[in-house]
Amino acid sequence: MAAIDMKNIVKKYGDGFPAVNDVSIDVADGEFMILVGPSGCGKSTLLRMIVGLEDITSGDMIIGEKKVNDLAPRDRNLAMVFQNYALYPHLTVYENIAFPLRLAGASDDEVDKKVRNASKTLELDEHLERKPGNLSGGQRQRVAMGRAIVRDADAFLFDEPLSNLDAKLRGQMRTEISRLQKRLGITTVYVTHDQTEAMTLGDRVAVLKRGVLQQLATPRELYTNPGNLFVAGFIGSPPMNFLPAEVDGTSVKLPFGTVQIPQERAERAQGKGLLIAGIRPEHFEDASVKDDTSSGSTFRATVDVVEWLGNEAYAYIPFEAPPEVQKQLTQLEHDLDGDQMRTQLVVSLDGASRIAEGDEAEIWVDSTKIHLFDPATGENLTVDESRAGRIPEREDPKAKEQAEKMADHGEEVHSAEEA
Amino acid sequence: MKQKTGIGTWIGFALIMIWCLLPVVWIISLSFKSLAETTAGSPQFLPKDPTLDNYSAILDNGDFTRALINSFGISLIATLLSVIFATLAAYAIARLEFKGKRIVLSMALAIAMFPVVSLVGPLFDMWRTLGLFNTWPGLIIPYMTFTLPLAIWTLSAFFREIPWEMEQAAQVDGATSWQAFRKVIVPLAAPGVFTAAILTFFFAWNEFVLAISLTSTTRSRTVPAQMSFFVGPDPFNPPYSQLATASVIVTIPVIIIVLLFQRKIVAGLTSGAVKG
């Protein structure tokens, strides 16, 4: 058991590509920490630096009370589950699980006791004599976890462990991992690009983009108080809607009409010109289904497509965005690994809604939940800082800017290579 | 249709088998004929009255048994050393990024392509000066040199197939680099190691040019070279049956080794194919 403290970690590859830029994350003893972000955001590199498979260019990696920057992986006493499990195909399940114990020179009795214990926990008893090649994906996954839990490691590290499993098994294993971690109470760092895993498993979630920490907070804080445009767009499915907005007093002018927002939110966005408003799909509703529409605003719009899912329905409403906003949104899509073709509003409606494709419908919006972002910096102007965890750019804007610059430099390195 | 191709396949199969195995059967049959029978001029295919005299004569022949020991010793040592060096070198080539990696690989290939005969002269002079002429190391060293390139190429291909994660997992599990190599990488590359071993052993076992040029007595002469000295008392009437017997005896270990290693290769392949 140990806390993991990362201080200003930087990773630069030999070709000058900065994979991780000045990331500081503190993982408390027994905490379940998630590293999440789109592909190439440096989350796996960071994990591999914790375990010692990648060198740290600069910064301090402290596990327990000890600085481990220069320690070999085997001296760090961490257990890791790899994306493709990395089981030893020439050994039986029993010997796979026993492998770390054998290396540590444990006696046969001790090995046997611990392996049987682990296999019981993971329900692998009847597979102990089989080779990994004869096991299903879920069973291999459990063997990989068995190899991790059999030794008394200071922390568990998971590198996208569920990405090779089918959807149903992924759900089961997710619960399994969560249960196991709660029971063992062991410090865990878990890398994923799947936001369901990020939201459900983590005590806290660190969102990374291009090797820069964007926000470090609980799932709820990330969802309700995203620190910037990137976090807002990354967390949540379907994603948050981004609309051009102009604030005048407490009224916000959106493409579909004008809505009123609370005074204290409006104040923070005064005099900033054109902004981006972020509204989650579920903060809209079909006005005819909603009993009390007084708390928000309503507007009329023509619905393009409706996807009815039973308990709810998604309605799509296209709109035109001015070029300044469009550019920022295109960049955001690029950062999120997406390629959105058109600007459209995704609205989540109650399953009872009768709105059909092509209808002009009256839509209600909960205007108290609207976030306003600065299109130039992407910063969330309306964030409730007391409930947003850690947002690096608020703590030390200069450092964050510096890190972003490094990441820009990294993109140049890559585009130069491609050219 | 199916039947037709079946028959065709079997006929082709039989033809190829006869083509390949007839000389072998002929040699085996010769080895059971008495000396009188083979010197008679045109001997029939099957021995008239089969005899084991040839076998007992050849096993009593001190020179032959001595050559057999030399062959075994030299081939086994050359194989062992070659496989050890090739494993280490191939691992480095597959895993490490270092300058001149391509040069090492192409040099190795160039050595393998070098005709053995062209080296006999220089080697003969060098070995005499260095005192390696007519010794075991005098043959082991060139055999290793000629088999290493192929072994390195084969093995580095095998090592490249093994995912990096295997080794990283072992290191995280508490293994040193050496332990990870020995307990995870080498067992996984076993089919490659056995392939390399077989190739090396056959080369050393069958090699003739160096064996006859770099030796002068039975102190280090191997069986292929020794057999060229089987002339018998009458130079116009070589002891064909005894030569055949020697050939059979030399072939037996090769067959045994192939059968043994073949099983290993198959076992290795099935376990190595699983990438966890």
Image (cartoon, coloured by chain):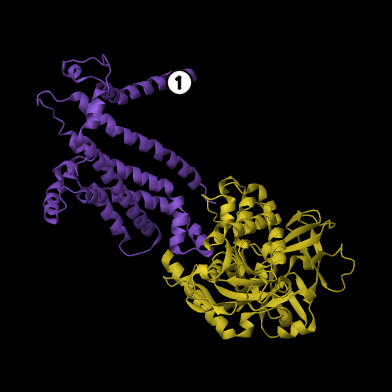
Chain colours: A yellow, B purple
**Viewer-closest of A279 and A250:** A279
Q: Is residue B263 visible?
A: yes
Q: Is residue A237 visible?
A: no
**Position above or below: A263 against B61:** below
User: Dividing the picture into quarters, in which one does residue A399 lie?
Assistant: bottom right
Q: Position of residue A385 (x, y in %)?
A: 71, 82
Outermost residue on the right side: it is A291
**Viewer-closest of A4 and A213:** A4
User: What crowding class fits label 1: few (fewer than 14 Cα within 10 Å), some (14-19), or many (20 or more)?
Assistant: few
Q: Is residue B176 left or right of residue A118?
A: left
Q: Secondary structure at mark 1?
A: helix
Q: Total number of numbered labels? A: 1
Quarter of the image with the C terminus of chain A is bottom left
Name which residue lies at 21% across and 24% down: B241
**Viewer-closest of B253 and A164:** B253
Q: Position of residue A61 (x, y in %)?
A: 54, 77
Q: Chain of mark 1?
A: B
Q: Position of residue B126 (x, y in %)?
A: 13, 54
Q: Position of residue B106 (x, y in %)?
A: 28, 54
Type of residue at label 1? Gly
**Viewer-closest of B16 and A22:** B16
User: Dividing the picture into quarters, in which one does residue A338 lie?
Assistant: bottom right
Quarter of the image with the N terminus of chain A is bottom right
Name which residue lies at 50% across and 57% down: B166
Q: Is residue A133 left or right of residue A360?
A: left
Q: From the image, tell me which residue sits under label 1.
A: B6
